[in-house]
Amino acid sequence: MSLARDSKVYVAGHQGMVGSALCRALNEAGFNNVVGQTRVQLDLRNQGATESFLKSEQPDIIIIAAAKVGGIDANRNQPADFLLENQQIQTNLIHGGFKCGITKLLYLGSSCMYPRLADQPMKEESLCTGALEPTNEGYATAKVTGWKMCQAYRQQHGCDFITAIPTNLYGLNDHYEAGRSHVIPALISKYHQAKTDGETTITNWGTGDPRREFLNVDDAATGCIHLLDHYSDAQPINIAGGFELSIRDLNEKVAELTGYDGEVKWDTEKPDGMPRKLLNDSRLKAMGWKPKINFDEGLKQAYEDYLERFS
Ligand SMILES: NC(=O)c1ccc[n+]([C@@H]2O[C@H](COP(=O)([O-])OP(=O)(O)OC[C@H]3O[C@@H](n4cnc5c(N)ncnc54)[C@H](OP(=O)(O)O)[C@@H]3O)[C@@H](O)[C@H]2O)c1
């Protein structure tokens, strides 16, 4: 059954990449009472401040899109910060939401919650069946704990708290800072910079053969709303869409988009990482949701957003 469109929805992390897409999608879906707080207004690591905000604001629904997110180096160098801060943020929101009697909570997990050697495409049943990837274990452990908290509050208190696991996202409001960006923004900025500086060669790591899955963040946001309206279960559910391509093909698309026409070399001495990584999307698909944004269109829009914000 769909949620009432006049429900008060608090999007934690509403200025982030996913949070801002959620605000657009909620607006589009007719929710007319969406609230958010910047980190300066409310530091979600602070339990007292978070609980008093929830008590005074009395939201009906909370979406947890606030998190300490970072690249591989940050994760490797600060596992304690990633574990602690994410646990604080999600614990304060989950327990605070329970205390003030919200009707629904959507917690956003991440594909790093899956065991490093999970069968591909990764099915929800694979969660917690093996060791996590060591490079982001702090972050992934916190993410698993958030899901387990949602599950425990459902079991003990009957709370309608659900967990979604989106695949790799790209699109508007992405992060382009070095050390923070994911593969698509990193390539956009690398190729754009090379073209602007007149460089004639770009060298990439590995063979370019690994395949990766991508979903536009605006599609992920409609997936979240579909789940808010139609999903109530302890088991997390993947938000994907089945679109994957090789890193080599992705490079070619970004080179064309940015107008870079120099040489692209592949340093095959460098590691490739996992040959293939994607989420099984059959459960959400069976619930009648599918992504709408064509990858080439979405990539073009992301590049335009980059040019507008950084060029
Ligand atoms: N992006 C992806 O590809 C992807 C894929 C799967 C899952 N997810 C999940 O989606 C969620 C959001 O990711 P994202 O990519 O949107 O990250 P993001 O752009 O960094 O957004 C995170 C938001 O959380 C806020 N925040 C962080 N710490 C806070 C604190 N202590 N108090 C208040 N606000 C705080 C940030 O505020 P500031 O801007 O002030 O730092 C930011 O607005 C994460 O849980 C992530 O695991 C993302």
Image (cartoon, helix red, strand yellow):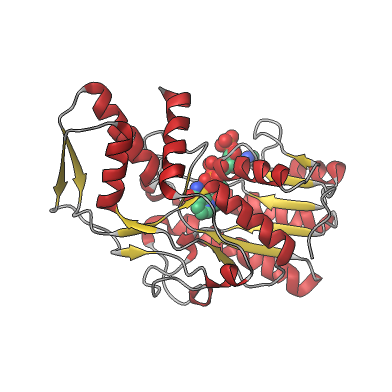
Question: 80 or 117: which is nearer to us?
Answer: 117
Residue appearing at x 48%, y 25% in the figure: 309
Q: Give the x, y percent position of residue 18.
A: 57, 45
Residue appearing at x 59%, y 67% in the figure: 284
Judge whether 41 appears above or below 183 on screen. above
Q: Give the x, y percent position of residue 48.
A: 76, 44
Question: 93 or 59: which is nearer to us?
Answer: 59
Judge whether 245 appears above or below 308 on screen. below
Residue appearing at x 67%, y 62% in the figure: 227
Total residue callouts: 0
Query: Is 189 left or right of 84, judged from the image as shown?
Result: left
Q: Is residue 18 visible?
A: yes
Q: Is residue 44 visible?
A: no
Query: Is 161 left or right of 165, judged from the image as shown?
Result: right
Judge whether 105 appears above or below 198 on screen. below
Query: Is 122 left or right of 203, judged from the image as shown?
Result: right
Q: Quadrant of the N terminus?
A: bottom right
Q: Give the x, y percent position of residue 236.
A: 60, 68
Q: Quadrant of the C terminus?
A: top left
Judge whether 15 appears above or below 242 on screen. above
Q: Quadrant of ligand 1?
A: top right
Q: Give the x, y percent position of residue 188.
A: 35, 36
Residue appearing at x 77%, y 73% in the figure: 156
